[in-house]
């Protein structure tokens, strides 16, 4: 009878130990899930920040590109004007030399 009682006690302790292990495992999973949720939120915020920075940079590049294009157009107009003025000066000198 004592052996039966001892067996029951061992079984009860073993079941209690397994229940505690399961409970510990569940708590561990909950903590891990919470940590992952926090990390996911942090990563999403970092991604949004980088996307905003990328968009700001893209807008700045487009503005700079437009500025460069305007400057290039101004340079082309001035080069044509310089060429026309050089031609006028050359013609004027030719007229003065012919006198």
Image (cartoon, rainbow, N blue to C red):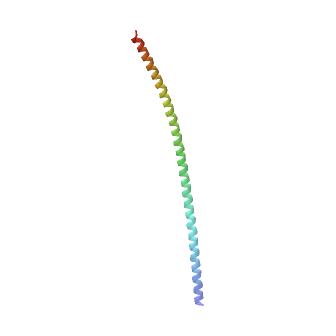
Which residue is the extreme one toward the bottom?
1
In the rendered image of this protein, does residue 51 appear above or below residue 22?
above
Q: Nearer the viewer, residue 97 or 11?
A: 97
Q: Nearer the viewer, residue 79 or 65?
A: 79
The structure residue drawn at horizontal position 55% and vertical position 52%, both measured from the top left corner, is 45
Within the image, what quadrant is residue 22 found in?
Answer: bottom right
Residue 61 drawn at (x, y percent): 51, 39
Which residue is the extreme one toward the left?
97
Within the image, what quadrant is residue 12 found in?
Answer: bottom right
The structure residue drawn at horizontal position 46% and vertical position 25%, both measured from the top left corner, is 79
Residue 73 drawn at (x, y percent): 50, 29
What is the number of callouts on the image? 0
Which residue is the extreme one toward the front?
98
Residue 7 drawn at (x, y percent): 58, 85
Q: Quadrant of the C terminus?
A: top left
The structure residue drawn at horizontal position 56% and vertical position 56%, both measured from the top left corner, is 40
Q: Nearer the viewer, residue 1 or 25?
A: 25
In the rendered image of this protein, does residue 8 appear above or below residue 37?
below
The structure residue drawn at horizontal position 57% and vertical position 79%, both measured from the top left corner, is 14
Which residue is the extreme one toward the top?
99
Q: Quadrant of the N terminus?
A: bottom right
Residue 44 drawn at (x, y percent): 56, 53
Q: Nearer the viewer, residue 36 or 78?
A: 78
In the rendered image of this protein, does residue 40 appear above or below residue 19?
above
């Amino acid at each position: 009878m004592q052996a039966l009682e001892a067996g029951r006690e061992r079984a009860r302790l073993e079941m209690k130990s397994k229940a505690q292990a399961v409970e510990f495992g569940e708590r561990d999973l909950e903590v891990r899930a919470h940590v992952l949720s926090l990390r996911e939120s942090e990563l999403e915020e970092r991604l949004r920040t980088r996307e905003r920075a990328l968009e700001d940079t893209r807008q700045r590049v487009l503005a700079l590109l437009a500025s460069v294009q305007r400057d290039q157009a101004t340079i082309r107009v001035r080069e044509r004007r310089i060429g026309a003025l050089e031609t006028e000066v050359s013609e004027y000198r030719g007229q003065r030399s012919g006198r």
